[in-house]
Image: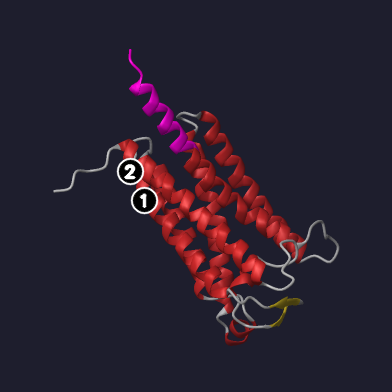
Amino acid sequence: MRPKQSAPEIASTSAVLWITAATVYLVAEAVSAAAFPGYSYATNYISDLGVPDVASFQGRAIDSPLHVVMNVAFILHGVLFASAALLTVRHRTWRPLARRWFVGAALVHAVGIILVGVFPGSPTNAENGLMLFHGLGAAMAIIAGNAAAIIAGLTLRRGNPRWLGSASVSLGILGLVGLVMLLVDSNSTAITLLPDGVWERLAVDTILAWELLVGITVLATRRRAGRAEEQPA
């Protein structure tokens, strides 16, 4: 029988998964954007990179030759995020209620971003009614992903390093504010503070930043602890 992972092993594995999830997403986004003629991080939506159609949609020119790369990255991110979360809550730091809420938020985020990858925000899907699943998935991914960061942050505030908990909560709140401002700014003719792409990235990139922050901090902490144990008394 294979022995169970110890707490440090669980933490290290989940940290690698968090880092991998964010890296896969960011690399796919950069590569897909580079192949997209005239793509703007400020005015285009992230999901424009996953649209297979070459067309004009909602006032934006859509032409993403590497749409498969972005959609696969959406799906992989969801799988990696859920896997990391399920491993993370096996650590004794988590209280039962916080564990349930965190896992629930992580799974909702995972399902949501997978829906984004399976149902691109395309003119074709807008015509056949499948755009509903894309919009629902985007809302699930953004809200639940930032909520997961907040829940994790509240748990991390009881441990060390304490600043990591505060940073996690702050990132989650900032991401939700970005989503609210995206909805307000995009649906108002009186308010145009920033282009839609900026607000959307504020709402999404906080999740990616949280993954990288937690993953890198956990690995660095484990490495320092290992070196301290190796030093002679």
- Main secondary structure along the magenta-highlighted residues: helix
Location of residue 113 in the rendering, given as x and y in whole percent from the top left corner: 51, 64
Residue 198 percent coordinates (x, y): 72, 58
In the rendering, at what x and y percent does residue 21 appear?
48, 55
Q: At x 39% / y 48%, what residue is drawn? A: 100
Q: Residue at x 62, y 79 (%)?
A: 122
Neighbor class of circle 2 (other Cα within 10 Å; few <14, some 14-19, many 20+) is: some
- Tell me if label 2 and label 1 are in contact, CB under 8 Å: yes
Location of residue 182 in the rendering, given as x and y in whole percent from the top left corner: 71, 60
Is residue 224 rendered magenta in the image? yes
Reading the image, the residue beneath label 1 is: 86
Q: CA distance from mark 2 to mark 1?
A: 7 Å
| Residue 200 in view of the camera | yes
Mark 2 highlights which residue? Answer: 90
| Circle 1: residue type | Leu
Q: Is residue 100 shown above or below 72?
A: above
Residue kind at label 2, given as amino acid type: Arg
Q: Which mark is residue 46?
A: none
User: Residue 83: which quarter of the image?
Assistant: bottom left
Q: Secondary structure at mark 2?
A: loop
Query: Residue shown at 67%/51% (left/top)?
Result: 177
Say which quadrant the C terminus sits in.
top left
Q: How is the image coloured?
A: secondary structure
Residue span colored magenta: 217-233
